[in-house]
Image (cartoon, rainbow, N blue to C red):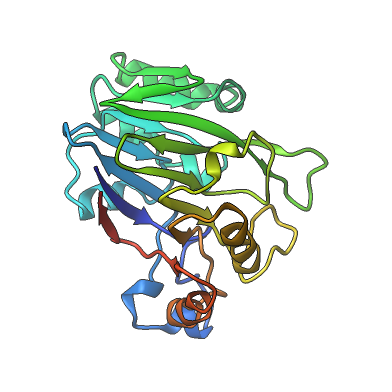
Amino acid sequence: MKIKFLGTGGNIGTPVWNCDCKTCRSADLKNKRMRASLFLTTDDNTNILIDFGPDLRQQLLQNNIRKIDYAFLTHTHGDHTHGFEQLSRQENIKILMTKEVLQEFEKNKGALEWFKKRNPSADIKNFDSITVDGIKITPIKLIHQKDYSKEPFPCVGFIFEDPKFRFAYLSDYNAISGDDNLLYNLDLIVSDANSWKDNGIGHAGIEENIQLYKKYKPRKLLLTHINHTVEHNESLKYCKAYGNIEPAYDGLELEI
C-alpha cells in the first residue's frame, strides 16, 4: 500500500491571502499547503481518495492521478467537499460516507442532481465498514464542534487495517466520541493539528496531539490540516522532542 498526502492545509490553505506572517512568506515548499486530502493505492492498484476539497483539481493534475475507485468523506464542510464536481469525470466511482454524514451531504440537492446527471455510473451511499483488497476500512466517530455551534457536526475518521499495517486518519476533530479501542498501538496515526493548541474552533492542536501520542502509543504520528500559524521546521523540531511525531507536508509519500 502507498499513501500520499495531496494536501495538509487548514480550511483556507497556506499561504493565506493578504497575510505577511513568516509561514505565508516562507519559500520552503513544506509551508505551501493545499486543503487536506489523502490518497492511497493498494497493492492491487485500487485508488482510494479521502476528502475532495476545493483544491482537488490541482491535486489530481499535479500528482498525475488518472483513476479514483473509491472516495471517502469525513464530513461535509466546504474545505473537504468543494471539489466534488471533479469526481463526475470518473466512471463507476464509489463515494462512501457514514449515514449521518450522507444525510448532511444530501442537503446540497442541487449539486447532487447535477452530479448524478453527469455521472450516472457513480455509486453514492453510506457504509458501516468495508474491505477493499484485503484492507478493512472502519469509520470512527469524532467530535468536530465549532465555537459558534451548539451541536457537534457529523464527522468521522477512518481506520485502515490489513495484516501488515494499521493506521488511522483523523482529519477534523477536537475530541473522539466513538469506540477508541482500535486506536491503540497503531503503526501510524494521521491527525488534525490545525494550530499549536485547540482554540475552540473544532480542531485539535499540536499540544493535544502530544497527549494523543502518549495515550494511544502509535509507532508514528503525522500531523495534517495545519494552518499558517504553524511553521514546518519550527513544529518539526518541537514535536520530535516528544517522540516520533512530525508535521506532514504536501506530496509526502509513504510505502507500506
Q: Residue at x 42, y 30 (%)?
A: 137
Q: Is 108 placed left or right of 50 in the picture?
A: right
Q: Residue at x 22, y 31 (%)?
A: 46
**With respect to residue 115, does 160 lie above or below?**
below
Provide residue 15's location: percent of width, then percent of height.
45, 72
Q: Is 253 placed left or right of 112 in the picture?
A: left
- Whether residue 156 is visible here, answered yes or no, is no
Most foreground residue, 137 or 59: 137
Q: Residue furthest right?
A: 150
Q: Is 79 placed left or right of 49 in the picture?
A: right
- Whether residue 197 is visible here, answered yes or no, is yes
**With respect to residue 198, does 182 lie above or below?**
above
Q: How many marks?
A: 0
**With respect to residue 158, does 111 lie above or below?**
above
Most foreground residue, 71 or 76: 71
Most foreground residue, 22 or 30: 30
Q: Residue at x 25, y 30 (%)?
A: 89
Provide residue 209's location: percent of width, then percent of height.
59, 62
Provide residue 53's location: percent of width, then percent of height.
43, 45
The quadrant holding residue 69 is top left
Q: Quadrant of the N terminus?
A: top left
Q: Residue at x 48, y 29 (%)?
A: 138
Provide residue 98's location: percent of width, then percent of height.
54, 24
